[in-house]
């Protein structure tokens, strides 16, 4: 079983849309990480958020839909 992390920003309408997709897909539990105050995360994800990352390192960049996140969950 994988663990999942959603990298996002505060006040991000795309992040809100991603959360809606995850809810509609009944996606399993995931952690949220806000990149705003972390220079390293900002450098990695700044232009890409929201990004859904699986614990084995596979990442799904926005835009994604319900079918995409279901495939990622395996």
Image (cartoon, rainbow, N blue to C red):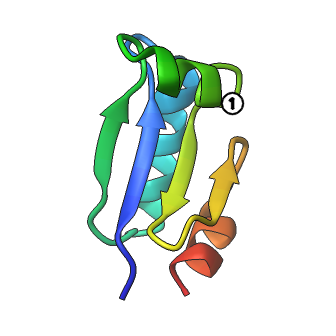
Q: In this picture, is 21 found above or below 47? A: below
63 left or right, relative to 34: right
Q: In this picture, is 51 found above or below 12? A: below
- CA neighbours of label 1 inside 10 A, class few (<14), some (14 to 19), many (20+): some
Q: Nearer the viewer, residue 70 or 58?
A: 58
Q: Who's the residue at 40% across and 68% down the image?
A: 27
Q: Who's the residue at 56% across and 35% down the image?
A: 50
Residue 8 percent location from the top left of the image: 45, 30
Q: Which residue is mark 1?
A: 48
Q: In this picture, is 53 found above or below 37? A: below
Residue 44 percent location from the top left of the image: 62, 30
Q: Who's the residue at 58% across and 67% down the image?
A: 69
Tell me if residue 32 can be seen: yes
Residue 7 percent location from the top left of the image: 46, 38
Q: SS class of the residue under badge 1? A: loop
Tell me if residue 23 can be seen: no
Which quarter of the figure has residue 1? bottom left
Which quarter of the figure has residue 43? top right
């Amino acid at each position: 079983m994988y663990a999942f992390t959603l990298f996002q920003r505060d006040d991000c309408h795309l992040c809100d849309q991603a959360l809606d997709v995850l809810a509609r897909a009944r996606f399993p539990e995931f952690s949220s990480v806000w990149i705003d105050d972390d220079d390293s995360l900002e450098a990695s994800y700044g232009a890409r958020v929201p990004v859904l990352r699986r614990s084995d390192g596979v990442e799904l960049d926005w835009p994604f839909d319900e079918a995409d996140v279901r495939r990622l969950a395996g």
